[in-house]
Amino acid sequence: MNTVRLVLFTRYPVPGSAKTRLIPALGADGAAAVHMQLTERTVEILKQTGQQIEIQYSGGDANAIARWLGSDPSYVPQVEGDLTSRLLAAMDPAPVIFLGSDTPDLSAHHVNAAINALQKSDVVIGPADDGGYYLIGLAKPYPFLFQNMRWSTEHVMPDTLDRLRQHDIGFELLETLHDCDRPEDLERWPWLNP
């Protein structure tokens, strides 16, 4: 199996700036605690794959992030700008799999399936039930997949698939999972409540 770079986007868990959409239900400290728990869980899952882990972080500094998440991953500050800017800056070298830390049901099985899919497909996507995705992997850089996207909407997944088809790029879809973004999502995972 070829080496695949696993890139996790996250932020230092400062109350008031982490998982802000959960603040109405949990308060700033509670939302930050959920973010901490999900990020730590995701990093442990990524370690199980034996692949190179790169944490693209915002907030805090590399030392604070490493004290939180351990010395195994490499740490890179996210570039300024929107999600498009951050993805484009982290796209090379490929193959690369981008993930967030908002998917409580993510397992090493899903990540390994994505790694295996990149051995035979150009792109692999883990769809999220809200119309986005929890994971996207690229065998080589495809900037057009991230440019002028309607992020944080139900259009992300359909738009991505349309672009892949227009460019005649082969892709594989993984199991659809649920993200934890809104207060009503918390009912699905009672163990997440701080």
Image (tube, rainbow, N blue to C red):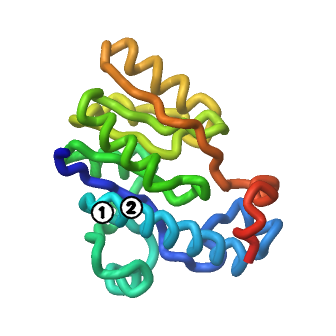
- Name the residue type under label 1: Ile
When the figure is inspected, residue 124 is found, relative to residue 78, above or below; the finding is above
- Name the residue type under label 2: Leu
The image quadrant that residue 115 belongs to is top left
Please name the residue that numbered disc 2 is placed on: 46
The residue drawn where x is 49% and y is 39% is 126
- Label 2 crowd (10 A; few <14 / some 14-19 / many >=20): many
When the figure is inspected, residue 187 is found, relative to residue 135, above or below; the finding is below
The image quadrant that residue 153 belongs to is top right
When the figure is inspected, residue 57 is found, relative to residue 122, above or below; the finding is below
- Which badge, 1 or 2, is on the more N-terminal residue? 2
Give the image location of residue 27, x and y in percent: 77, 75
| SS assignment at label 2 | helix
The reply, left or right, for residue 66 in relation to residue 40 is left
Q: Considering the image in quadrants, where does the N terminus appear?
A: top left
Give the image location of residue 81, x and y in percent: 41, 54
The residue drawn where x is 28% and y is 36% is 118
